Amino acid sequence: MRRHPYARWLAAAGTLLAAWIGWGLYVLATTPRVDYALVRTIDGVEIRRYPRLVLVETTADSDRTAFGRLYGYLTGANEGDEELPMTAPVRTHERSRPPGSAGWPGAGPDVTMGFFLPQEYDSEAAPEPEDETVTLTVEEPRTVAVRSFSWYATPERVERNTGALLEALEEHGLETAGEPFSLGYADPLTPPFLRRNEIAIELA
């Protein structure tokens, strides 16, 4: 029986799709996650209590630059050339710079990105970064409100979910502290339908 001329291409595409999905599931299943206690849920928003955590952070003019610095720290750009495991989520906070800021022709974002270190590391055990633009930060226990969504975290989806988060908190009389930030749980190669994104804000 003669095979359809596109059968080989369809089989190859199916194999690639299965490998893509398999990779996404593998990353989600094997990447350690930051522990927290779920306090309650209101209108699709989780109220969580996080323990004391240590982060490695940097501020850059793009996600790619920030991620590269932090990934370099995890893979040995630190005192002792120590390799540390990647954890989830990755935290991202964008702030706009005013027009005329140094190095910027106009208004634009500053991206502050943070990787949470495995919880066996405290501020004394974590190796110091070699890059002066990378710092270690200790966060004390805090309560955070979180709204989750899937697919790619486009500016439109981030804005929509941020609005829904803040509206739910206002309706329930919960006071916030600071600005909203993003939490991402997937690596760049994870299929969009397997991605988990979150918009979060600390509660007062």
Image (cartoon, rainbow, N blue to C red):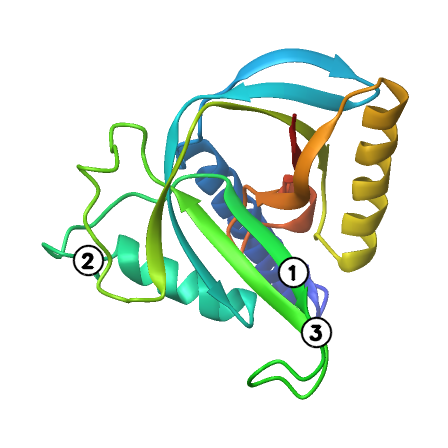
Q: Circle 1 — which element?
A: strand
Residue 69 position (above or below residue 148): below
Task: Pick the residue in front: 10 or 86.
Answer: 86
How crowded pointer 3 is (Cα within 10 Å; few <14, some 14-19, many 20+) is rated as few
Task: Pick the residue in front: 177 or 64.
Answer: 177
Q: Quadrant of the C terminus?
A: top right
Disc number at residue 133? none
Residue most extreme to the top:
39
**Residue under numbered circle 1:** 95
In the image, which is nearer the foreground, mark 3 or mark 1? 3
Q: CA distance from mark 1 to mark 2?
A: 27 Å
Residue most extreme to the bottom:
105
**Residue under numbered circle 3:** 98
Q: Circle 2 — which element?
A: loop
Relative image position of residue 144 (x, y in whole percent): 62, 27
Q: CA distance from mark 3 to mark 2?
A: 33 Å
Residue type highlighted by circle 1: Arg
Relative image position of residue 164 (x, y in whole percent): 85, 35
Residue 88 position (above or below residue 169): below
- Asked if residue 54 lies left or right of residue 169, the reply is left
How crowded pointer 1 is (Cα within 10 Å; few <14, some 14-19, many 20+) is rated as few
Q: Residue at x 60, y 20 (%)?
A: 48
Which corner quadrant of the image does residue 41 belong to?
top right
**Residue under numbered circle 2:** 78
Residue type highlighted by circle 3: Pro
**Of callouts 1 and 2, the N-terminal one:** 2
